[in-house]
Amino acid sequence: MSTDLQAASLAQHQRNTALLASARFLGTRIESNVLPLSLDVDTTEKLTGEQVDLLEALQKEAAATAIRALGSLARIDEVDHLGGGLELIPALLLTLAVTDYEQKQYTIEHAHTSIGYFSCLAALGFLDAATVVDGFRRGVDIPGHVSWVPGGTQLNGGRLGVMVPVSTGQALGLRAQYQEQAWVITHCGDAGWISGQALNGYGAADSHGAPVTFVMHRNGIQLSGTTSSILDRDPRGPITAMGIELLEIPTLHDLPALYAAYREARALAARGQANMIYPTGFRSTPEQRIDLAAFGRMYGVAAETEAMASANGVAMDQEIWIPGSLMSFRDTASMLECLFAVNELPGGKTHHDGHLKGRDMDQVLAGPMLAVSAAQQDALDRMRAAPPRRVVTRARPAPGTPNLVVPRDRQQSIPLPEPGSKESPRAGSEAGYALVAREFPDRMFVVSCDLDPSTKLAKARDLLAADHRFEMSIQEQAATLLTNGLAMSGHGPQLNVVSTFAAFFEGIAREGFDLWRYQRNLNGVNEGLNVTFHISHVGACTGRDHFSGWGLDWINLGLGYLPYLHRFYAPADARAAFAAVCDLAAHYGGHIIGIPRDNLPVLEAQDGSGPLYPAGMDWEPVTVYRRYPGARKAVFAFGAPAFLAAEAAEQRVAAGEPVDVVIVNALPLPEGTLEALLTGYPDGAVTIEDGLIGCARSGVRGFAGVVAAAAHVLHVPVAHIGITDPRIAPADGHMETWAHFGITARALIEAVASL
């Protein structure tokens, strides 16, 4: 690492530490004493009048907090998604009442509604309302999207639609632990449902019987306009076609009816039927006319509705659709503007980016829908006088925490290919996963993409119960997201593996990695989840498939997500692959393992005493493959081409120039390791890898870039062997293909000589 990068990293670490030290609601374990709002949805048949009063009082308190937060943002000329945040509150509070934070959990797909989420948690006592008001979108505690805080969801929202397959995975993981008691409620909007991730997620929920309920907030408004102007399509047809059972109710704002829907949804989920609560809204029927006057009466805003209609020349008998979930709910003026917008009436505004800039916050708070009745206040006072509910929120284990540790003697009992043979590293990973599956069948989950026979997960998968293995066919993106959800179904030791070809990870399944970027642990760190992404057929070592199955950027992919990883493995042979699988299973955290397809020599120790990687070995980040007295140069190998380095070294030794060979088994290397290696070879080092290393126009990347940065500071000369121009290639075996790209022992010899 260069001096500048070292200094920058140290400075960033200091800033990170200072920022986390200022946090109020982040840590490894937080105990909250909150309002004892708890409903057993399985036994409580219906809400009492007092419970309705209590929930409505809490709705109004949360809405007031959200409005004050936007007023605070307005003072610094900022906006947020107040409309959706207010609209989320009523149903989310009911969800919080039925959540037990263990068997029954929840998340939010349309995570830009976060001010409603944080405000609900403040109303219950998990957060301080003043901190929400003055800290929203400022600092680290209360960010602008849904993030994990006490009482909250650990499935932090990012892109629309993504949380559908993720929460499905979480529900499946909970089912494996708690059977029919498992339940996940996922609040979602009427924009994200059309995304490919969401549609695939619905299909996965149906195919695997996930105990999940989606609550659709059908408000008719999206980012740049009304839903009808952007995607004028009824979601119900496609969603039911994916196997989701719909529970239609008129509105999410009728608490007794909504609770009844929750009861029905819970019963369906317990039977393995994924479902969605869908508010249809109100339209005129032969029995009832729905017009502006009816809306005013329904929500107690008759005068305000009439004033809005009069100002815009609209008759009060204008027939309308009243959405079943009202954008800007309880902010009377904005709510009316949203109502007019979805009905294409003059004066309508959509308020996706709702705000209080230029508005009188006190006037908004004095609106009729925020007034707390005496009965509501009494219900709230009685709840506050009751003994509090104690909720403990624990952070996920730190990366590297012991996970599924296979005893050494069990590893040593597994037959592995011997030196002198050639075998695909897939054989070693296959043996490793099967061993873990036999040792820990209740703690391992495998997600498949119709490729298990080729990625060699089939043997392990077949050792697992049906509720621990999930076939997703060619839905690689949704498969990775579902696996992320499985990782968040519990904090105990667990191995969650999803496998497909490197080319598909690079081009299709990247969302599974990207989700890690915005998954904040309770301690404030965005980090990789307890997931192994098994990338098969890496590099150009893919048989005679030509470009169709190549993953030439697999090393750069791993390096791009290195901040979120515990380890990124590049096994050099079948036995190294076995050791890597045993190591990744033994440690909690995010892992990537890149497995070549074709047969490679099983590497032998220099003295001929046995394999370079004996079964049951202690994991090591680097392995010295060849060491010669007086060597001042070395080859640093990463992945499949390591055996070529031994050939080159032997030829250089015969020519009178000793050259060592060091295999890097995984990244990141421990602090100082690479620098120490380079210092030991003052005359230079050559890197070799089966992946893109850049060119003169793009600069050095890949493993070559990692070494080049450190070598620059130490003034150690380096050269690099890898793929520089991937545009043209033969359809041959991997040795011929490598030769075309210049990945040969001869190229190594020439590179060493050039140092």
Image (cartoon, rainbow, N blue to C red):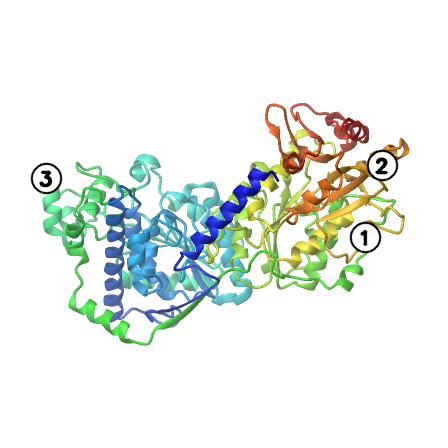
Residue matched to label 2: 658
Q: Foreground residue, 695 or 197?
A: 695
Calculate the distance from the C-alpha at mark 1 to the C-alpha at mark 3: 81 Å
Crowding at label 2, few (<14), some or many (≥20) Cα neighbours within 10 Å?
A: many
Dots 2 and 3: beta carbons under 8 Å? no
Query: What residue lies at 38% left-to-right and 59% top-to-bottom?
Result: 24
Q: Mark 2 vs mark 1: which is more N-terminal?
A: 1
**Residue 535 falls in which quadrant of the image?**
top right
Q: Foreground residue, 91 or 647?
A: 647
**Residue 126 falls in which quadrant of the image?**
bottom left
Callout in the foreground (2, 3): 2
Residue matched to label 1: 416
* Kind of residue indicated by mark 3: Ala
Q: Estimate the x, y position of residue 442 in percent, counting from the top left.
A: 62, 64
Helix, strand or loop status at disc 1? loop
Residue matched to label 3: 311
**Relative to 398, 45 lies left or right:** left
Quadrant position of the C terminus in the picture: top right
Helix, strand or loop status at disc 2? loop
- Is residue 519 among what the camera can see? no
**Relative to 208, 450 lies left or right:** right
Crowding at label 1, few (<14), some or many (≥20) Cα neighbours within 10 Å?
A: some
Calculate the distance from the C-alpha at mark 2 to the C-alpha at mark 3: 89 Å
- Is residue 460 among what the camera can see? yes
